[in-house]
């Protein structure tokens, strides 16, 4: 890295609002503290929660005083460009990935991102930089729901609703790794095909098929657990397929809100990163055949187009290509 360089390109917000507020401009490089890693970003994940942040939702909800220009991007991957003096685990040139949710010094929609070393991991063997860039947010959210909220056990039946989305397509794979019997509700023919290609045998099209009928042979007494990655009428119909005493989890922010049923435990949760869940997810990525699907890649200057695409049908994840390797 050129030590004389003190600015970088970033897709920034100068005020909260719609996708049109995302503009490309030069801003100062983020500072790094003694325990921080400066990452030269190659790819940044575009998460469904980025819309809420772009609109100022998190700032209002959490009482955060925003600093503009504001850089979105809660996950990304690239090359270590510099390290703080207390960082011993990484060297300049290492390929790494990290979550960086609501980072006060800015996110990954920029050429460089500063992240505390506790959030940074080496990219697992066999995983591309692009795959690593988009896996943190959805992987942590899926794993938090399966392990910490639902406490999913081997042999249990689970329905993953919204299985072809970002969180969902990781959740079906992680649930399978845990030895659960996985029933996936995907969106559209292309969504069903993607989930089948992941080796999940019980897959249905939530847009056209009868959920109760499709699930009756798989779990005739009802599902032990369910992870809802989407809401709506079909989701509320699917709630009827959970057995009495069953457990339901959903990431906070699902709209419209799920309609709970008596006799079922329903828990909303946040997919917040911490060192423990980052370590657990990294273990799965290193040791299991986890596939990360990106349906569209945009250039950094096309960030607003990526946010428009978030409102349309897509499979898996969207991402930004920030810089070349």
Image (cartoon, rainbow, N blue to C red):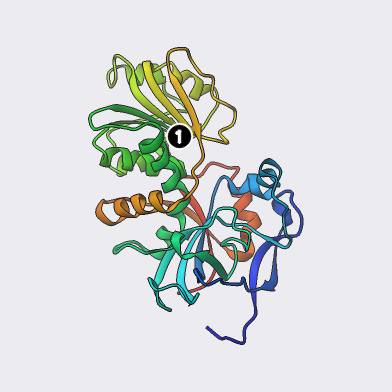
Residue 17: horizontal and vertical position, in percent?
Answer: 74, 49
Residue 152: horizontal and vertical position, in percent?
Answer: 32, 32
Quarter occupied by residue 192: top left
Residue 22: horizontal and vertical position, in percent?
Answer: 69, 58
From the image, which quarter does the C terminus lie in?
Answer: bottom left
Q: Residue, x 36% and y 54% (percent of image)?
A: 279
Front residue of 125 and 267: 267
Q: Residue, x 29% and y 19% (percent of image)?
A: 219
Res 190 seen here: no
Quarter occupied by residue 275: bottom left
Question: Where does label 1 land, which residue?
Answer: 162
Number of other residues with Cα within 10 Å of mark 1, as a class: few under 14, some 14 to 19, many 20 or more: many
Q: Residue, x 28% and y 57% (percent of image)?
A: 286
Q: Residue furthest right?
A: 15
| 278 displayed left or right of 290 | right
Above or below: residue 62 compared with residue 71: above
Front residue of 94 and 203: 94
Q: Residue, x 59% and y 28% (percent of image)?
A: 256
Above or below: residue 137 compared with residue 323: above
Above or below: residue 157 compared with residue 311: above
- For the residue labelled by badge 1, is the local secondary structure a helix, a strand or a loop? loop
| 235 displayed left or right of 218 | right
Res 205 seen here: yes
Quarter occupied by residue 124: bottom left
Residue 171: horizontal and vertical position, in percent?
Answer: 38, 40
């Amino acid at each position: 890295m050129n030590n004389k360089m003190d600015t970088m390109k970033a897709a920034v917000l100068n005020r909260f609002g719609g996708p049109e507020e995302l503009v490309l401009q030069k801003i100062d490089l983020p500072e790094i503290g003694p325990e921080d890693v400066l990452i030269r970003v190659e790819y940044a994940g575009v998460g469904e929660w980025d819309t809420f942040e772009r609109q100022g939702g998190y700032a209002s909800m959490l009482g955060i005083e925003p600093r503009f220009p504001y850089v979105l991007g809660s996950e990304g991957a690239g090359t270590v460009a510099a390290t703080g003096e207390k960082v011993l685990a990484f060297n300049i040139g290492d390929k790494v990935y990290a979550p960086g949710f609501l980072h006060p010094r800015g996110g990954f929609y920029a050429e460089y991102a500063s992240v505390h070393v506790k959030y940074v991991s080496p990219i697992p063997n066999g995983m591309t930089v692009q795959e690593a860039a988009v896996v943190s947010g959805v992987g942590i959210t899926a794993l938090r729901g399966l392990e910490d909220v639902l406490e999913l056990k081997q042999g249990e039946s689970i329905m993953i609703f919204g299985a072809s989305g970002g969180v969902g397509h990781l959740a079906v794979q992680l649930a399978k790794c845990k030895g659960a019997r996985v029933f996936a509700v995907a969106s559209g023919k292309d969504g069903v095909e993607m989930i089948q290609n992941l080796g999940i045998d019980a897959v249905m099209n939530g847009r056209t098929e009868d959920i109760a009928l499709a699930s009756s042979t798989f779990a005739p007494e009802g599902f032990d657990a369910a992870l809802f990655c989407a809401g709506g009428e079909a989701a509320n119909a699917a709630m009827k397929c959970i057995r009495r005493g069953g457990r339901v989890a959903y990431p906070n922010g699902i709209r419209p809100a799920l309609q709970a049923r008596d006799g079922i435990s329903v828990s909303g949760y946040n997919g917040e990163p911490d060192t423990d869940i980052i370590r657990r997810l990294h273990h799965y990525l290193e040791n299991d055949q986890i596939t990360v699907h990106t349906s569209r890649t945009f250039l950094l200057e096309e960030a607003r187009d990526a946010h428009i695409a978030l409102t349309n049908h897509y499979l898996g994840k969207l991402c930004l290509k920030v810089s070349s390797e």
